[in-house]
Image: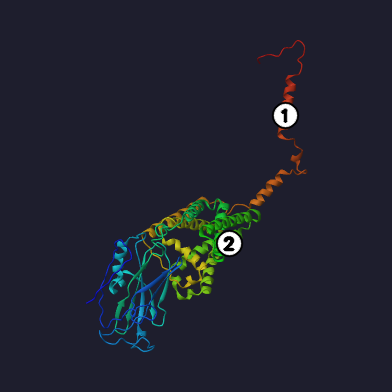
Amino acid sequence: MCTWYLETKEAKPVQNVAIPLSYSERDPIPGGCNLEFDLDIDPNIYLDYNSFETTIKFAPANLGYARGAEPPPCDVSTGQESRWRLQYEVYQYFLPEGDLTEASLLRHLQRMAQVPQVKASAVKVVTLTADDKTTVSFSSLPGQGVIYNVIVWDPFLNASAAYVPVHTYACSLESGDGSCVSPGRTSTKVFSTVFALLGLFVCFFGHRFWKTELFFVGFIFVGFFFYIVITRLTSLKYDVRLVLTAVAGSTGGILLVASWWRFGTLMLCMLCVGLVLGFLVSSGIFFTPLGNLNVFRDDGVFWVTFSCVALLIPVLFLGCLRILNILACGVLGSYSVVLAVDSYAFTSLSYITLNVLRRALNTAFRGALLRAPFQTNDFIVLAVWGMLAVSGITLQIRRERGQPPFPPHPYKLWKQKQERRVTNILDPSHHIPPLRERLYGRFAHIKEFFQREQPAGERTPLLL
C-alpha cells in the first residue's frame, strides 16, 4: 500500500497531478545515494535560475535491489558492481511559446514522467557519467516554459529509471511586473522600435544614403561595447544603462560619419561595417550546436575563435567593398526588426546576439548549454527576416548598377566649391563684366538710340 499526503499553503484550490511509477529490482534508484539534500532517497531535481542561466542539480542514483534487501553501498568508488557504472541522460522539453497556463503545464508534465515518454518527447542534451558532477547549466529563456528531467541508465543491466521532472519559466509568475507575459520593458520597446525603423531604412536605402548607414554601424559598434563596460563596472538600473548606451551609440555614429566627411577613409569605414556583419555571422555560428562543444567552454578559445570568424568577413570581401556594404545593409538592417519583435513577442532568434552579450557580461555563462526552442513564432520571424534581407539586397544591387561604387569624399567636394568662389586673376573670364552689367549696358544703348532727335521735316512712320 502506498499513501500520499498533499499539503498546500494556498487557500484557493490548487491543481495537481499524481503519477505512480513502479520499478523492478533491476532498475536503478534515482537519488538513492543522496549525500547533499534532506531526504535519504531523493529523486527530485533542484532548479535555480537567474536572468543569465538556469542550473539543475540532482542526487546520484544507486543500483537497484530487491525489496527488503540491503541497498548496495554508495561509498564504493570502483568496479562494475558499484553505482559508478551508472550514466545520467539529461532531457529538455520546451512548452508552447507564450503558454503560461497551469492546465498546459500539467498536461506536458505527464509526458516527462516516465522513461519511454521522456525519450519520445524531449531532447537529450547531455550525458553524464558517475565521475561528472550532477549539475548542468542552461541559458535562461525568460517567459519560455521548460521542463527538465534526468534518466539514470544502468548499461550493465540495460535498465533505466526517471527522476521527478522540474519546470521553470525563468521568471516569477507572482511578481506582478509582467515580466513573464511581456518579454520587454517599456524602455526596451521604445529603444528597439526606433532602432528597427532606422534599420529598415538602412536595409533598403543604406548604400545610397551612405552617411545614414555609417551612423547606424557606428551606433552598434560603440553602443555594444559601452553597454558591456557600464554593466560590468557599475550597478546602475537597466533603464539608466539603456539611455546612456543610446547616447554613447549616437556619439559613436556621429564620430564615424565625421571621420568619413573629413578624412574620407573608405577602408576604415568598411572595416567597421565588415566587423559588425562578421559579429552577426559569428554569433549565428555559435548559436548552432557548434557553440555547445566543450572546447568553447574556455573563454580564451571562444573569444579568439569568435574574433577570427568576425575578421574573416571583411577580409573575404576586400576586393568587392560595394557588395560587402550592400550585404551588411540588408542583413543588419533586417535583423534589427527581429530584435524589435522580441520586445513584443517571444522569439528565439534574438538570442543569436543576446547569448554573446550574456557571455561578455557574466563569466559563469560559459558553462551554460545554449538551446532555444524553434516554434511557430520563430519560423514566422525567420521568414520575415529572410524576406527583408533578400528584398533589401536585391533592390540596392539593381538600383546601384552603373553608379559609382561609393559617394565622393565630402570634404574634397566642399573644398572645391570654396575654391570656385575665389576667382583667379589670370583667368581671362576675370576681365569679362558680370552678366548684370552687360545686360544693363545693352539696354542703355537701345534707349539712347530711340531718344536721339529726328531731323527737321521728317516724321517717324507709325507703320512700316
Q: Amino acid at mark 2?
A: Leu
Q: Quadrant of the N terminus?
A: bottom left
Q: Nearer the viewer, residue 108 or 239?
A: 239
Q: Position of residue 255 (x, y in %)?
A: 62, 56
Badge 2 or badge 1: first in the primary sequence: 2
Locate the C terminus by quadrant.
top right
- Label 2 CA crowd tier, 10 Å (few <14, some 14–19, many 20+): some
Q: Is residue 231 above or below residue 82?
A: above
Q: Which mark is residue 133?
A: none
- Residue 149 placement (x, y as % from top left): 34, 72
Identify the secondary structure beneath mark 2: helix
Mark 2, residue position: 271
What residue is at 58 percent from the left and 57 percent from the top? 248
Residue at image location 43% in from the left, 66% down from the top: 140
Using the image, tell me which numbered label, if any, was put on residue 440.
Answer: 1
- Mark 1 nearby-residue class (10 Å; few <14, some 14–19, many ≥20): few
Image: 217 above or below 45:
above
Q: Does residue 78 show up?
A: yes
> Mark 2 or mark 1, which is nearer to you?
2
Q: Amino acid at mark 1?
A: Tyr
Q: Is residue 124 above or below residue 181?
A: below
